[in-house]
Amino acid sequence: MPSCPLPVGGHRCSWLAGLLFVVASLAAAVAVAWLLRGTAPLDTRFPDNDRLAFLLEHAADFDLVFVGNSRIYRGIVPAEFDARLAEHGLSVRSFNLGMPGMRAFEADLAVRYLVREAGHHLKTVVIGPGDFSPKILDWEKGTRRTTAWHTGSQTAAVLGSTWELELPASERADLARRHLGYFLRREANHGEGARMLVSWIGDSRLTEAEETLIRRDAGFQGLDGLTNPVIVDRRRRFEAGRAAFSRQVERNAARRRGFAAPVRRSLATLVRLGQAVRSGGPEPVLLYGPGRGHYARVTAEQAGGLPFLSFDDPSRYPELFDPDLRFDSSHLSRAGASVYTRLLADAMVPVLAAQEEAAGAL
Amino acid sequence: MLFSELRFVAFFAVVFAVHWGLRRHSLRKLWLLGASYAFYAGWDWRFLGLIVFSTLVDFVAGKRIEAGGSPRVRRSWLIASLTANLGVLGLFKYWDFFVESGAVFLESLGLQVSVPTLSLILPVGISFYTFQTLSYTIDVYRGRLEATHNPADFALFVAFFPQLVAGPIVRATEFLPQLAARTEFARVPVRACATLFLIGFVKKACVADNIAALVDPVFASPEAAATATLWLAMCLYGVQIYCDFSGYSDMAIAIAGLLGYRLPLNFDSPYTAASVTDFWRRWHISLSTWFRDYLYVPLGGNRGSAARTWLNLGLVFLLCGLWHGASWNFIVWGLVHGVLLAVERIVPVARRPVLSLARWGLTVLLVMLAWVPFRSGTLGDAWTFLCGLWSSPGTGLPALAPGWWVLVLGVGLMHFVMARRDVLTGAERVPAAVFAPAYGAAVALTLPWAAVDYQPFIYFQF
């Protein structure tokens, strides 16, 4: 039997040697993973990093950025937004950094990253994520994208939200285990090799054609005319259920029950994000776009004193809930996007004017 | 729970620590048995009963065969074991296939029939553990093995989790003696096993899973792919299935090794084979030797006339194909190999050493071509694919970048390198103080290349 190289004997030697082996392996793994992670910029980890890369490179060309999910991406047309503000005498150059399917924790990370990298150029960041729900949807499971937003701070936040969920302990524990798994995968750079390689060889820059396209639409892309089967199918199902959509909107508007507990927590998280943006330089504006009429009421107290614009209110903005201006139950059509953009610009006028006034006073 | 998943690492860490923490050998075995059942229940707890049933049937059959005086009684118990095991396998895996194929045949004769299909879920690993238990009763019947009188040992032999769901197919003659002797942790080749696990992980998660995303669309729509893409996809699939299955086997052998048990070699650089006969000495060795010892040789092997040998080969490989799945694609794949083996017995040029390079190239080409029906969804798709290899006007799918040939050649090259160097012995010689951080660094350098979306092991379905 091999002799023990450690100053202990017998069974304890094996245990101690094994422990040292594991610790040394883990330490080396963590160190190498950390070094590797430092070689690839974070923006390569976002799902639509072309537009983020463009924005970071041309941040000086823009004053205002919209960040959030597809309701932002498919609903706000920067060129029309800027033109409407110009009619009000405000000169703003905006960019749409909404990303399809972007969850709130992912948006949170994107906003913080954007402010850190380009906050000194920007005057305003409009943040419009969905709920800060810790649940993992089926299409998100095991994906690179879900892994990407599980930084240490985001994982801590999502674990906190998981703990507060009104679910049996076993389900919360399972959800927490999944989030921890994503965190570990992220820390291990799981699946990042190809992106890292592209980053190392410097081939991640946008082509001229890509730059031109992004610049032309300032990040916006409507849903009309897209041929993705999933999108086409959503449209078809919405057309078949237009009446049901209208009834649901009416029901939601009639309830006017205020915020449920999980939504209150989401709102609180969103307010904290807004405050973080403000401390980074730009002024935050919180935004809930037109959905199905759930978010009709937001008090100034709930908004933490931050500007909060809610368009998810069928009684105030009935046109945004007109099925003719909808692509599906969650998104506006291209024509609907124009209407929403104009309403948003109008609502932003006093907010931006106040910001300018405050800046002038300084 | 796949070996390449984080939760398996957590599961194994607990199993490993408790296993070696227990002093008594019998407790260790019971712990491993419990862990194995828990591992299988993680897949689908409903099928645990099948494993327990198979275990009980063969444990009792083995004892009765050994104790039974007359040959008739012994044969009866053997037949009972074969019937029970193959009956369960047939019910879950082949019932629908044969019933539906029969109905199609009758309909082709103009007879309308209504078929009672069961649509049962295929229990994971059923083909593997059924063959293991069968080998036990057959070996006891033949007098090559003494029946075990320890039900826990036998249950662990059947359910040992490293090889439970996708092999290697372990013989009782190899495994039961290992259960009799206590193993000391100090004798476990930890560095070699850890290295083998990492090699398996790289094959599975970094190579096979990434290739899957490339070849799946081509095999799904071969008519839409150009000729060059079809050739590349065919070869990439050859790499994928090798890396997937041999990677799993490497990990299984490594995990068993870390627990102090030896599993048989399952792959021996199969694409270096100089003939199809040689290929089957190197590919899925535990299955090919099972068929050789328990079917081919009892049928007469190559001891009879040439025609009888061909017939035996054809039958064995037909069943080998059918073992892989209840589909005409697998049957065709098996028959193709059977025919190639028969042809190699009568074509003298295949034995000339001067043509070794051409022989090797031809072998690889034939094996790759045979993968097409194996992987295709239907025989029609396979035919479209094979026709497209000579001329395909398909333009619907984007072409696979020719750079992927580098991966094919790289894996081929590694095949020859790995065949000639004893990497594992080398790893065991490295001082632990150097090996541990080097291993951690290697893991950290490997994980970025692992595919993000887990792909189940291809052989799980068999």
Image (tube, coloured by chain):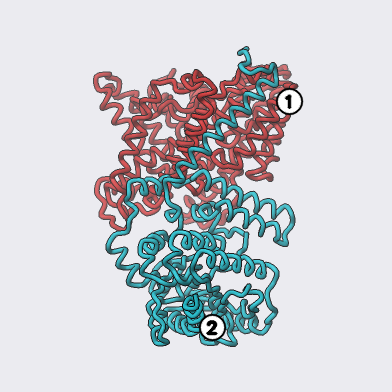
Chain colours: A cyan, B red
Q: How many tags in the picture? A: 2
Which amino acid type is marked by label 1? Leu
Amino acid type of the residue that numbered disc 2 sits on in the rendered structure:
Phe
**Outermost residue, front side:** A362
For residue A321, the mark is: 2
Q: Chain of mark 2?
A: A
Please tell me which residue is depicted at 45% across the width and 80% down the height of the picture: A341
Q: Chain of mark 1?
A: B
Same chain? Circles 2 and 1: no
- Secondary structure type for disc 2: helix
Could you tell whether B235 is left or right of B86 in the image?
left
**Residue at left offset 60%, top offset 38%:** B9
Q: Is residue B138 visible?
A: no
* Disc 2 to disc 1, C-alpha distance: 67 Å
Which one is nearer the viewer's eye here, B223 or A86? Answer: A86
Return the residue at label 1. B22
Say above or below: A31 vs B424. Answer: below
SS class of the residue under badge 1?
loop
Q: Nearer the viewer, residue A248 or A178?
A: A178
Viewer can see residue B305 = yes
Q: Residues within 10 Å of mark 1 (few under 14, many from 20)?
A: few
Determine the image quadrant of residue A243: bottom right
- Residue B207 on image: x %, y %: 42, 40
Point 38% across, 38% down: residue:
B238
Q: Position of residue A76 (x, y in %)?
A: 45, 76
Q: Which x, y percent locates residue B273?
A: 36, 26
